[in-house]
Amino acid sequence: MITSDITIDAGFDSGNIEVVSVDGAKAHLHIPADHMSEFAQWFHFRVSGAAGRELVLTIDNLADSAYPEGWPGYRACVSEDRQFWGRAETSYNKDAGNGTLTIRYTPASDLAWFAYFAPYSMERHNDLAAKAAASDGVSYRRLGETLDGRSIDCLEMGEGDTQVWLYARQHPGESMAEWWMEGALEVLTDPADVIGRVLRQKCRLHVVPNCNPDGSFRGHLRTNGVGVNLNREWDNPTAEKSPEVLAIRNAMDESGVDFSMDVHGDEAIAACFLEGYDALPDMTPEWEGKMRRYQRLLNRRTPDFQMEKGYPKTPAGQANLSISTNQVAHRYKAVAMTLEMPFKDNADWPDEHQGWSPERCKALARDCLGALVEWLDGADA
């Protein structure tokens, strides 16, 4: 009996893979780098013709990927209906093929989708923006246009004086950031949700669910349509290289910023954590204390957040002002922070079936907004 080869394709919104060879239900794959960039890590592809057959998918040369430490302990995301994203059996061998990831999965149907993290397509983004814009008390604002001609969407709401900016997906492959945004907008636009009601009363909220729609559609990990890392452009954004940052920062200049959260994902660290602005040259204990108080409140609200794991501490006075959180804090004297979520799982509270998931991203968003309510009330933990 001759068994036909499977078919693998990625010609869709956020798709990214290169097929080196296929032999029956086995395939050798390669992750292309972002356009005009050396960053390579994001993959998203579809396999057809494999119902009931064990797929063995190998991706090599990962020692040369953007973040090689992201592969040990990682499990690929998989879905057969593009609604529920589970995790496939995955192993990483750093000594084979210059670093080889092997994914094994037996689909029940003839279509299976694999991704570095559960994708958040531009079509879903458009649905999210449209639904939020149609909600009572919400106004839509087009902040600008990307180099590929896409809109930079902003949803604004609230009657208060405290200017709050929530923005996500400067790095497009960090799709968990827009799942977080979906959860946040569900809270903020629900007239029955008391957390949303309090925040709309006390704040003017500016929400940018996707800062990098070009990179998102192209299937990039970290850059926009011309290979620029937007989170290194905040000190000097230009219309030629980073119109996304220029548009958002111009809007921030108009409103001012009191509190901001820039939502991201981290490849290697299996935890949720916050990074602040404590290395700014003009840092004061009072200013740093405001940020630390928010961290403690969030830590108290949910076991999915923690304060022990994170990035190495930057020496005092040596903050990189090209990074969004540092620039926003410095420019507006704001309480600014970067939220990082894992591509892998929360190692303290692992989920065998899904790892870190869209559902947990959305739940964390509600906890982040709840902690903001307490923070505004002057609570401490």
Image: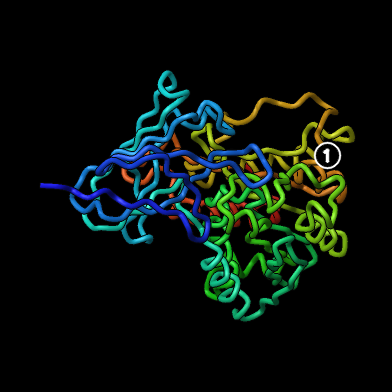
Q: Which residue is mark 1?
A: 321
Position of 101 with respect to 229 (left or right) is left
Could you say where residue 373 lies in the image, as x and y percent from the top left? 64, 57
Q: Quadrant of the C terminus?
A: top right
Residue found at x 38% / y 60%: 82
At numbered mark 1, what does the secondary structure look like: helix, strand or loop? Answer: loop
State which quadrant residue 320 falls in.
top right
Position of 127 with respect to 235 (left or right) is left
State which quadrant residue 162 falls in.
bottom right
Q: Is residue 217 above or below residue 322?
A: below
Q: Residue furthest front?
A: 2
Residue found at x 68% / y 51%: 224
Could you say where residue 70 lies in the image, as x and y percent from the top left? 51, 32
Could you say where residue 294 lies in the image, as x and y percent from the top left? 66, 45
State which quadrant residue 327 falls in.
top right
Residue found at x 54% / y 72%: 127
Frontmost residue, 224 versus 87: 224
Q: Which three-letter amino acid code belongs to the residue tagged 1? A: Leu
Residue found at x 72% / y 50%: 226
Frontmost residue, 143 versus 10: 10
The chosen color scheme is rainbow
Could you say where residue 80 lies in the image, as x and y percent from the top left? 31, 57
Position of 192 with respect to 106 (left or right) is right
Q: Is residue 175 above or below residue 307?
A: below
Q: Residues within 10 Å of mark 1 (few under 14, many from 20)?
A: many
Q: Residue furthest left?
A: 1
Position of 294 with respect to 190 (left or right) is right
